[in-house]
């Protein structure tokens, strides 16, 4: 019997597609727009630390709890009555570092695109499938003076590209390539999970320009929330800091 081999690129594309489907399925999920920490700065000793995210009206929330070096939990709750808890009780140092090593570049990529209106507009074209990395298969070693117009002409691409790109035809090709590299980190699922991987409880973080989706899975249940972009950096820094305290 022949064994079907799936390469990393195919697996990555499949996971990205699943992440997009998840985000579309939960497009109206509650938006966490406030963040508080417990205990407060006056409490010196505590083995329980929590970051409490809530919606503006506090009707829904998401709490991250860290109680030891190996235990992290996320609880999704609605109107202080219903709650779904997801315990990651066997996190290793490698598991935590892998998550930080992936989510920090993703956040930097989002920040870079948010700061530059041209990058935002080009990113929209790329994410809607109008442009792709294949444009750069024939780039010279020194592409600094090549523009998007040059690439379209030299590669005999469909002239229909020129209409959506009308405002960007003189955009330096190397900067566009940098943008494509940035987008590799956006809308990419980032897993926080234990050595049990898919068979246990795990949390998937997906960063977009406006929100970060948090999807939690266990064999029995699933939870999801959105976190506004302005809180993402603070949340990531808080989690990393608490892990370092134990």
Image: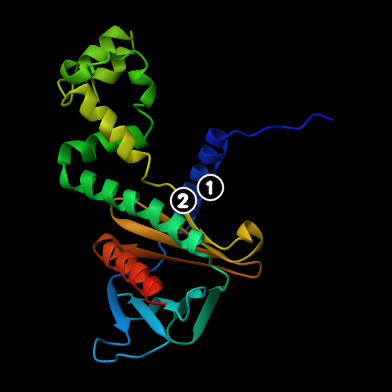
Q: Is 95 displayed left or right of 167 in the figure? A: right
Label 1 sits on residue: 18
Quick one: quadrant of the N terminus?
top right
Q: Secondary structure at mark 1?
A: helix
State which quadrant residue 61 falls in. Answer: bottom left
Q: Position of residue 126 (x, y in %)?
A: 33, 33
Residue 189, disc: 2
Q: Locate residue 13 relative to residue 187 in the image: left or right.
A: right
Tell me residue 201's x, y (percent): 59, 66
235 vs 79, left or right, is: left
Pointer 2: residues within 10 angstroms few (<14), some, or many (20+)? many
233 to 19, vertically: above or below? below
The reply to whether discs 1 and 2 touch (Cβ–Cβ < 8 Å) is yes
Q: Earlier in the sequence, mark 1 or mark 2?
A: 1
Residue drawn 32% across the image and 58% down it: 211
**Quadrant in the picture for the C terminus:** bottom left
Q: Residue visible at 29% across and 92% down?
A: 43
Please determine whether, in this image, residue 197 is positioned above or below residue 152.
Answer: below
The spot of residue 144 in percent (x, y) is 18, 20
Q: Nearer the viewer, residue 7 or 213?
A: 7
């Amino acid at each position: 019997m022949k064994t079907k081999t799936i390469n990393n690129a195919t697996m990555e594309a499949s996971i990205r597609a699943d992440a997009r489907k998840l985000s579309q399925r939960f497009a109206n999920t509650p938006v966490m727009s406030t963040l508080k920490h417990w205990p407060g700065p006056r409490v010196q000793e505590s083995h329980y630390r929590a970051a409490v995210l809530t919606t503006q009206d506090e009707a829904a929330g998401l709490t991250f709890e860290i109680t030891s070096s190996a235990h992290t939990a996320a609880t999704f709750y609605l109107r202080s009555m219903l709650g779904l808890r997801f315990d990651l009780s066997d996190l290793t140092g490698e598991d935590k570092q892998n998550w930080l090593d992936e989510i920090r570049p993703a956040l930097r990529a989002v920040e870079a695109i948010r700061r530059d209106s041209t990058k935002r507009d080009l990113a929209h074209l790329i994410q809607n499938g109008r442009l792709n990395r294949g444009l750069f298969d024939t780039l010279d070693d020194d592409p600094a003076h090549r523009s998007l117009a040059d690439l379209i002409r030299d590669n005999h691409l469909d002239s229909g590209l020129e209409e959506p790109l009308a405002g960007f035809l003189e955009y330096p090709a190397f900067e566009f390539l940098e943008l494509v590299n940035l987008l590799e980190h956006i809308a990419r699922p980032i897993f926080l999970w234990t050595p049990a991987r898919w068979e246990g409880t795990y949390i998937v973080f997906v960063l977009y320009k406006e929100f970060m989706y948090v999807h939690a899975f266990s064999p029995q249940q699933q939870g999801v929330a959105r976190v506004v972009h302005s809180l993402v950096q603070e949340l990531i820094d808080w989690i990393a800091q608490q892990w370092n305290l134990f």
